[in-house]
């Protein structure tokens, strides 16, 4: 509706095409395309970036929105625990590989670039040390809920570290994190009976999809947020994250850990 050319990055291209057709019915003038992307796969992330860059389009806004939640323990094809791989590592690599394009787009257009990482209030429910660096892939120390919280904490730490790096470089790109709220999507497909009961008892707290997208769109688009970076938003307002989320040394350690983990996987 704002005239942006939107590229949907989707694991399921059939679902992406259905979304595209639905949007075009509502807005025939929409500019929208999709490319295949599985964020749990390093190979897929690199392939997506190659395909996107080949389109020779500017990149002004990057919304890192994908996620899995409360999954039973499993390793990805790259040997990484699935929630950490999909929710953090995939987005971390995707963002890093697209940064040069975002920098050149901001420089050439004079338009502020914006990166929005979807985190969650669940980032407060993680392992005692915040990030389990020494046992990311250990099934014996795995908690599906704490692993999800860990991945959402990683999103916040990534945002804050990247925001500081870009500020130091003097780049016209902001990076912020968002808690979308409790949204009625299939993200909860692994949650089981307990979550079903919780949803029934807390129906008044849940958001529909447009309501759940509101804060993301606000942070990505609103003119009043020009220059605002390194913040955490909920319900279209800046809010305070956990102490872990604002720990600079933890953010730097996670950055280095993520780079080394990605580098250890063959291209």
Image (tube, rainbow, N blue to C red):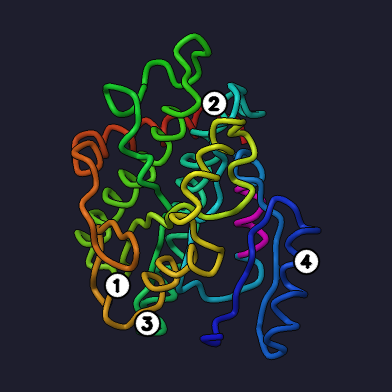
> Which residue does the numbered mark 2 point to in the structure image?
81
What is the distance, in whole Å, between disc 4 and disc 1 at their CAs?
Answer: 33 Å
Q: Is residue 141 visible?
A: yes
> Which mark sits nearer the N-terminus, 1 or 3?
3
Q: Which mark is residue 17?
A: 4
Front-lying residue, 149 or 190: 190
Cα distance in 3D space between marks 1 and 3: 8 Å
Find disc 3 in the rendering and name its residue. 111
Identified at 59% across, 45% down, the residue is: 187
Residue ID for mark 1? 172
**Mark 2 vs mark 4, CA separation in Å:** 29 Å
- Rounded to the nearest whole Å, what is the CA distance between mark 2 and mark 3? 37 Å
Q: Residue 159, how many percent across, how many down?
A: 33, 52
Secondary structure predominantly adopted by residues drawn in magenta: helix
Kindly identify the residue that appears in the image at 41 percent across and 36 percent down: 259
Is residue 36 shown above or below 259? below
Residues shaded magenta: 45-52
Rate crowding at label 3 as few (under 14), some (14 to 19) or many (20 or more) other CA atoms within 10 Å.
few
Give the spatial CA distance, label 2 vs label 1: 34 Å
Q: Position of residue 29 (x, y in %)?
A: 68, 90
Q: Earlier in the sequence, mark 2 or mark 1?
A: 2
Q: Position of residue 96 (x, y in %)?
A: 44, 52
Residue at 43%, 37% (x, y): give it. 151
Q: Is residue 81 above or below residue 12?
A: above
Helix or strand or loop: what does disc 2 sit on? loop
Percent position (x, y) of residue 50? 64, 57
Q: Is residue 48 magenta?
A: yes
Nearest to N terminus: mark 2 or mark 4 = 4
Real-space Cα distance between discs 3 and 4? 29 Å
Which quadrant holds residue 36? bottom right
């Amino acid at each position: 509706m704002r005239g942006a050319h939107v590229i949907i990055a989707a694991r399921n291209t059939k679902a992406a095409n259905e979304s595209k057709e639905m949007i075009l019915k509502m807005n025939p003038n929409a500019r929208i395309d999709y490319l295949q992307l599985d964020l749990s796969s390093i190979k897929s992330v690199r392939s997506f970036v190659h395909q996107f860059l080949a389109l020779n389009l500017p990149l002004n806004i990057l919304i890192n929105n994908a996620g899995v939640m409360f999954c039973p323990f499993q390793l990805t094809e790259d040997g990484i625990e699935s929630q950490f791989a999909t929710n953090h590592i995939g987005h971390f690599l995707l963002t890093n590989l697209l940064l040069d394009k975002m920098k050149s787009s901001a420089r050439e257009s004079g338009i502020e670039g914006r990166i929005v990482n979807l985190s969650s209030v669940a980032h407060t429910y993680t392992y005692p040390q915040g990030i389990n660096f020494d046992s990311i892939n250990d099934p014996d120390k795995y908690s599906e809920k704490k692993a999800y919280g860990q991945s959402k904490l990683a999103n916040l730490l990534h945002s804050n570290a990247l925001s500081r790096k870009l500020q130091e470089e003097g780049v016209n790109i902001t990076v912020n994190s968002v808690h979308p709220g409790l949204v009625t999507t299939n993200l909860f497909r692994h949650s089981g009976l307990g979550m079903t009961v919780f949803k029934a008892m807390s129906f008044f707290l849940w958001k529909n999809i447009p309501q759940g997208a509101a804060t993301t769109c606000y942070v990505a688009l609103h003119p009043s947020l020009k220059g605002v970076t390194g913040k955490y938003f909920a319900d279209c307002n800046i809010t305070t994250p956990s102490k872990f989320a604002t720990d600079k040394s933890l953010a730097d350690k996670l950055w280095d850990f993520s780079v080394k983990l990605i580098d250890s996987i063959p291209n």
